[in-house]
Image: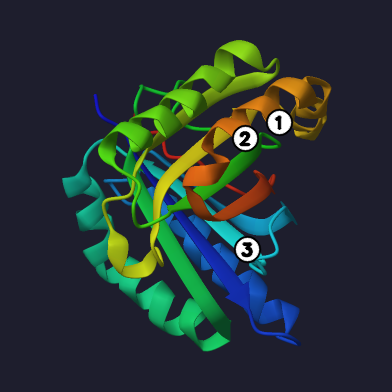
């Protein structure tokens, strides 16, 4: 199985009525019932760790193939929610899609799971060998940082809304405390950052917690 990760970041307009925000999130979370979806959660961002990011909300979903992601994207219910509930209240939207380098289990994440999403924009002169090195560094984090339940990474295959960010990863923790515990491995994490820093032209890091109102598909 080649799981496809789909992450969308939203910037809701300032002073938007909370009722409209709730309608957006309810509409997005309701899409979990669509057949192609094996996991979907949408809610407010817990924290952003990048000056390049002012996003307020996030959606994370999973599919068993690129074709299933395409079916979801083209589904009338998805198009309706985007048109009626998302676009009218959002200033900014970006999305990144990648094929996971492993099969993350469970596919469906329980409530209160903490997620750290990282998008990397590479400098123009970075070659394939360097990209492989970057992906290798990300893959090695799970074995060296305690508390990570899952981590996937890959190259973005949907450039239209990704703004040049070409490598992405998602790390999953049991909860916020476990995610915060990554600070205990600060020396190792900083060493890994030094290995790839010269290759990067931009980084977005967003922390997110699966809300209790999120639902997950049983189509596993």
Quadrant in the picture for the C terminus: top left
Place of residue 103 in the rendered image (x, y in percent of width and height, measured from the top left):
36, 22
Place of residue 23 in the rendered image (x, y in percent of width and height, measured from the top left):
59, 73
Colour scheme in the image? rainbow
Q: Given contact means CB atoms under 8 Å apart, are the residues at marks 3 and 1 in contact?
A: no
| Residue 94 in view in this figure | yes
- Left or right of residue 146, residue 4 in this image: left
Q: Which mark is residue 190?
A: 1
Residue extending furthest left? 67
Q: Which mark is residue 57?
A: 3
Q: Which element type, helix, strand or loop, lies under badge 2? A: helix
Q: Which mark is residue 41?
A: none
- Left or right of residue 183, residue 22 in this image: left
Q: Earlier in the sequence, mark 3 or mark 2?
A: 3
Q: Given contact means CB atoms under 8 Å apart, are the residues at marks 1 and 2 in contact?
A: yes
Residue on which the image places disc 2 = 193
Q: Which element type, helix, strand or loop, lies under badge 1? A: helix
Foreground of the two, 148 or 49: 49
Q: Pointer 1: residues within 10 angstroms few (<14), some, or many (20+)?
A: few
In which quarter of the view is residue 154 placed?
top left
Quadrant in the picture for the N terminus: top left
Q: Which element type, helix, strand or loop, lies under badge 3? A: strand
The residues bearing labels 3 and 1 have C-alpha atoms spaced at a distance of: 27 Å
Residue at position x 36%, y 76% from top? 80
């Amino acid at each position: 199985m080649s799981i496809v990760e789909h992450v969308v970041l939203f910037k809701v307009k300032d002073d938007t009525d909370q009722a409209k925000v709730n309608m957006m999130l309810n509409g997005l979370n309701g899409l979990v019932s669509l057949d192609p979806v094996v996991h979907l959660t949408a809610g407010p961002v817990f924290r952003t760790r990048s000056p390049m990011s002012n996003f307020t909300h996030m959606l994370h979903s999973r599919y068993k193939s690129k074709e299933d992601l395409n079916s979801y994207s083209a589904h009338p219910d998805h198009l309706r929610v985007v048109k009626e509930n998302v676009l009218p209240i959002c200033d900014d939207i970006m999305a990144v899609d990648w094929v996971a380098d492993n099969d993350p289990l469970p596919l469906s994440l329980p409530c209160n799971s903490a997620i750290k999403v990282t998008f990397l924009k590479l400098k123009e002169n970075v070659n394939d060998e360097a990209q492989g090195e970057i992906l290798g560094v990300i893959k090695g984090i799970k074995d060296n940082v305690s508390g990570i339940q899952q981590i996937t990474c890959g190259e973005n295959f949907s450039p239209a809304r990704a703004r040049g960010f070409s490598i992405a990863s998602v790390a999953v923790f049991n909860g916020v405390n476990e995610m915060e515990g990554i600070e205990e491995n600060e020396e190792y994490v900083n060493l890994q950052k030094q290995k790839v820093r010269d290759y990067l032209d931009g980084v977005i890091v967003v922390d997110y917690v699966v809300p209790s109102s999120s639902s997950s598909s049983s189509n596993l």
